[in-house]
Image (cartoon, rainbow, N blue to C red):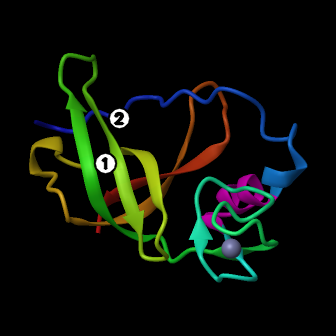
Amino acid sequence: MAYVARKIPFVGTVDTNPETKPFFEGAAAGKLMIRRCTSCKKAHWYPRALCPFCFGDCDWEQASGKAKIYTFSVMERANPPYAIGYVTLAEGPSVLTNFVDCDFKALKIGQDVKVAFIQTEGEGPSLPFFTPA
Ligand SMILES: [Zn+2]
């Protein structure tokens, strides 16, 4: 199945929540920004002010962009078809994502993927998605 790019919708605005501003600024600069707890040292996704494991304070860090497919599903009846799923970042958290720029029939659970920044529909922000490494 040849890959056909589709415009991925973005709902919301990038500047309404100061807590996520570094994420959107990073994405605009081609950096996947995640939060890591300063107490228990665990990284988490999606970005939150307090650690979801221990309620400690967190700092931003740039993720490597390396991940493995945890699970995925291909929407073959959509036009054009698309694939979504979870990837597990090298830093630990799992992220819901679209898979882009790849043959969906070749996707495999456990496959290495890397982050790719794609502009979202309607002049929306550039956001991180994943493609085979
Ligand atoms: Zn913590």
Q: Is 24 colored magenta in this rendering?
A: yes
Task: Write down the region rendered in magenta.
Answer: 22-34
Determine which quarter of the picture holds residue 69. bottom left
The image shows residue 133, relative to residue 6, as above or below, that is: below
Side (left or right) of 1 relative to 16: left
The image shows residue 40, relative to residue 11, as above or below, that is: below
- Residue type at mark 2: give it: Ala
Label 2 sits on residue: 5
Can you tell me whether the CB of the residue at mark 2 lies under 8 Å from the nearest atom of ligand 1? Answer: no
Residue at coordinates 86% horizontally, 43% vertically from top-left?
17
- Residue type at mark 1: give it: Asp
Determine which quarter of the picture holds residue 22. bottom right
Specify the label residue 101 is tagged with.
Answer: 1
* Label 2: element kind: loop
Residue at coordinates 28% horizontally, 57% vertically from top-left?
70
Q: CA distance from mark 2 to mark 1?
A: 7 Å
Determine which quarter of the picture holds residue 1. top left
Side (left or right) of 89 relative to 35: left
Image location of residue 65, percent across then percent down: 47, 70
Side (left or right) of 33 relative to 98: right
Dot 2 surroundings within 10 Å: few (below 14), some, or many (20 or more)?
A: few
Which of the marked residues, 2 or 1, is nearer the chain's N terminus?
Answer: 2
